[in-house]
Amino acid sequence: MMSGLIHLLNSHGLTEDTIIKATFYGIAGLTVLFAFFVVIARNIFHSALSLAVVLIGVACAYLYLDTEFLATVQVLVYVGAIMTLFIFTIMLTADVHKKMSLKINPRVLLSAYAAALILIILIKIINAGPWLPEVKDAVPLDLAQLGRSLMTNYGLPFEVISLLSLAALVGAIVIGKTEKK
Amino acid sequence: MIPQNHFLILSAILFAIGIFGVLTRKNAIGILMSIELILNAANINLITFNKFQKTPDGLGQIFALFVIAIAAVSAVIGLALVISIYRNAKTILVTKINLMKW
């Protein structure tokens, strides 16, 4: 089906490369737009919803980098679990209808300058630095290889992560429960 | 093909927006969300280098997996703390929480 679609688009003078580029820059622009909305939205609930869009956009960027597994994990863990947690916490704590005003005060301006400065420096470094030559014909790692190296070479960090998750589970219950009177 | 630099610039923009959010948000949940943005920017970098440079055994992907796991853990603990603070201080605005200020 996919090849048929590509053939159809080719007959209209669109190459696969053009389509890949157009969709990538579209998604990247949307991601940045919603990321901006996350930090400037006046209603915290709206900013949580925009964060979900940003996370899906980042998952799409992973697809362009040939890491389908991580894109799946990103959607499952971030959009499925973490966003639900965020939204539950917002419901439990903040008054959702209350708007928080983002006043343009010196502190916000200073933060904007700092962030812009960091961005400019990073982009200068990215464009200036002589990177190692890009590997053109790299075969993407398949899931079986990934799982194997996770279980052999990186087995110890994997176990440490499991322990950390367990500790966080217990810790969250202990922090979150109410004191017995 | 999309060049490596464009992925890195996307990640840099997300990182800068996240920094701006951490510095300006007064709501503790907003700060946590900005931290998630920063962690995502780091993940894009890791996976970009995993694709465009020679890395053994998909090291970048495994690193990114670990970052996602730690981000989940930090979100859980952070939100539990936020709920606990809200129960005690009745607010989650970080400018109003001055329990340890003298």
Image: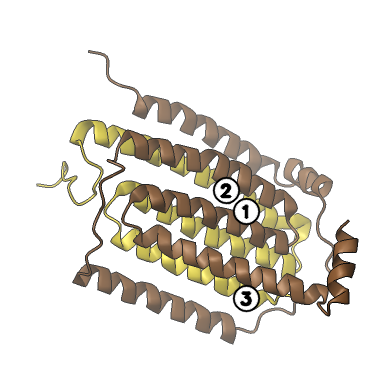
Chain colours: A brown, B yellow
- The answer to whether A159 is drawn above or below residue A180 in the figure is below
Residue found at x 77% / y 43%: A147
Residue found at x 80% / y 47%: A143
Rendered location of residue A132, percent (x, y): 71, 78
At label 2, which amino acid type do we have? Ile
Local SS, label 2:
helix
Q: Earlier in the sequence, mark 3 or mark 1?
A: 3
Q: Which residue is mark 3?
A: B6
Q: Which residue is mark 1?
A: B64
Q: Nearer the viewer, residue A22 or A10?
A: A10
Looking at the rendered structure, which numbered label has been put on residue B68? 2
The mark lying in front, picked from 3 and 2, is 3
**Which chain is indicated by disc 3?**
B
At label 3, which amino acid type do we have? His
Establish whether labels 3 and 1 are both on one chain: yes
Do tag 2 and tag 1 residues touch (Cβ < 8 Å)?
A: yes
Do tag 3 and tag 1 residues touch (Cβ < 8 Å)?
A: no
